[in-house]
């Protein structure tokens, strides 16, 4: 059986695509396509549909949330807070698979940050 071998892209609507792309590049290092697309390092990617009535993503009309792996969550949190970005943490989010934090992009989309356990 043939299987997909990775995520080729994450596509979503934005009020101001150019400004939002610049925000992702400046604060998370994810570039849109200039001169080539962002390339992730190898590693696991979780693919997990959630129940329609979940409150895990935040507001009820939010249909997706992206999760980015990071090497040093504490350093990333410090960097984001220095840039004036609010970072949410909660002890219940940390688990046997790693530690988590959450931010929102300028258009309110949730972004989960994950430092996997070694």
Image (cartoon, rainbow, N blue to C red):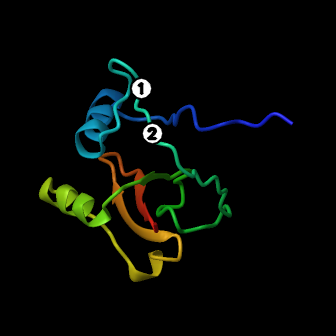
Nearer the camera: disc 1 or disc 2: 2
Q: Is residue 9 visible?
A: yes
In front here: 87 or 109?
87
> Callout 1: 10 Å neighbours few (<14), some, many (20+)?
few
Q: Give the x, y percent position of residue 30.
A: 35, 37
**Residue 44 locus on image (x, y percent):** 57, 52
Residue at 64% in and 52% down = 47
SS class, disc 2: loop
Q: Position of residue 87 (x, y in %)?
A: 28, 64
Q: Residue furthest right?
A: 1
User: Above or below — where is 90 with respect to 27?
Assistant: below
Q: Position of residue 90 (x, y in %)?
A: 38, 78
Residue underneath mark 1: 37
In front of the other: 71 or 100: 71
Residue 41 lies left or right of residue 54; in this view the side is left
> Residue, x 50% and y 53% (percent of image)?
65
Residue 48's place in the image compared with 33, above or below, is below
Find the residue positioned furthest to the front: 118
Residue at 58% over, 37% down: 7
Circle 1 — which element?
loop
Q: How dense is the environment of label 2, judged by Cα within 10 Å: few (below 14), some, or many (20 and up)?
A: few
Instruction: Decide if residue 3 is on the left or right side of residue 84.
Output: right
Which residue does the numbered mark 2 point to in the structure image? 40
In which quadrant will I find the N terminus? top right
Q: Disc 1 to disc 2, how far (Cα)?
A: 10 Å
């Amino acid at each position: 059986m043939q299987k997909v071998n990775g995520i080729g892209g994450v596509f979503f609507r934005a009020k101001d695509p150019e400004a939002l792309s610049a925000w992702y590049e400046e604060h998370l290092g994810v570039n849109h396509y200039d001169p080539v697309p962002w390339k992730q390092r190898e590693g696991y990617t979780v693919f997990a549909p959630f129940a329609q009535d979940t409150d895990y993503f935040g507001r009820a009309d939010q249909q997706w949330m992206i999760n980015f792996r990071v090497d040093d969550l504490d350093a990333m949190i410090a960097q984001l807070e220095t840039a004036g970005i609010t970072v949410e943490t909660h002890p219940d989010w940390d688990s046997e698979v790693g530690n988590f934090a959450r931010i929102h992009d300028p258009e309110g989309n949730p972004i989960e940050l994950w430092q996997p356990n070694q």
